[in-house]
Image (tube, helix red, strand yellow):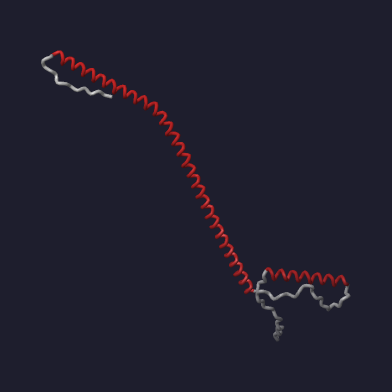
């Protein structure tokens, strides 16, 4: 603590007392300056000592905060990634459904147009192929039988008669023979 020196009025009657008073004042100022210097040096030493510890404490707290914020950022990133994946799956599913609908509509319209043109469907061709195979088998059986049956006899197929086609078909009727032009 700095000591305050109070100056007392010098008495003019004693010339040696003023010199003594000035020397006490100078000594007091020197003592105060010395104390201020020592206090500054002590504060500097304390700051160096505490500053290192304080710096290390700040580094530890900064590292802790960095880890915590990285963890939070990774959690948010995972959450956002999950949401985006779900949205992408939903969009892909909807797009697939729309393509399936479009494909079905296209197939239906194509089948309808081919039916109007009289083009047989794959199912019609399959039924006819099966019928031809059955007839070929019946002919083969008849050939093996060696003529035991009459040449004009009809062989009944083992398959149920053909059902009506799903699309109406025009049957080709026999045309009347053309009359020969008289020459």
- Which residue is drawn at the image coordinates 52% and 47% (left, top)? 78
Q: Residue 123 placed where, x, y %? A: 69, 69
Q: Quadrant of residue 180?
A: bottom right
- Which residue is drawn at the image coordinates 87% and 70% (left, top)? 144
- Residue reaching furthest bottom? 182
Q: Residue 76 placed where, x, y %? A: 49, 47
Q: Is residue 46 left or right of residue 92?
A: left
- Which residue is drawn at the image coordinates 25% and 19% (left, top)? 30
In the image shown, does 73 or 41 lie closer to the viewer?
41
Q: Please tell me whether residue 125 is drawn above or below residue 57 in the rendered image.
A: below
- Which residue is drawn at the image coordinates 17% and 15% (left, top)? 19
Q: Is residue 8 left or right of residue 67?
A: left
Quadrant containing the C terminus is: bottom right
Total labels drawn: 0
- Residue reaching furthest left? 13
Q: Residue 2 placed where, x, y %? A: 26, 24
Q: Please tell me whether residue 134 is drawn above or below residue 183 in the rendered image.
A: above
Q: Is residue 123 left or right of residue 64?
A: right
Quadrant containing the N terminus is: top left
- Residue reaching furthest top? 16
In the image shown, does 79 or 48 lie closer to the viewer?
48
Q: Residue 6 placed where, x, y %? A: 19, 23
Q: Please tell me whether residue 156 is drawn above or below residue 61 in the rendered image.
A: below
Q: Is residue 9 left or right of residue 106?
A: left
Q: Quadrant of residue 55?
A: top left
In the image shown, does 45 or 126 lie closer to the viewer?
45
Q: Please tell me whether residue 98 is drawn above or below residue 20 in the rendered image.
A: below
């Amino acid at each position: 603590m700095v000591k305050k020196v109070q100056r007392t009025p010098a008495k003019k009657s004693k010339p040696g007392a003023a010199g003594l008073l000035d020397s006490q004042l100078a000594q007091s100022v020197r003592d105060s300056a010395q104390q201020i210097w020592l206090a500054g040096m002590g504060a500097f030493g304390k700051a160096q000592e505490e500053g290192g510890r304080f710096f290390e404490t700040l580094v530890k707290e900064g590292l802790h905060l960095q880890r915590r914020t990285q963890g939070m950022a990774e959690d948010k990133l995972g959450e956002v990634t999950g949401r985006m994946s779900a949205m992408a799956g939903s969009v892909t599913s909807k797009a697939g459904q729309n393509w399936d609908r479009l494909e079905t509509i296209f197939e239906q319209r194509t089948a309808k147009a081919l039916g109007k043109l009289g083009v047989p469907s794959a199912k019609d061709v399959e039924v006819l192929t099966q019928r031809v195979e059955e007839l070929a088998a019946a002919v083969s059986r008849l050939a093996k039988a060696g003529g035991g049956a009459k040449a004009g006899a009809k062989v009944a197929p083992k398959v149920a008669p053909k059902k009506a086609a799903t699309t109406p078909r025009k049957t080709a009727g026999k045309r009347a023979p053309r009359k020969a032009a008289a020459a």
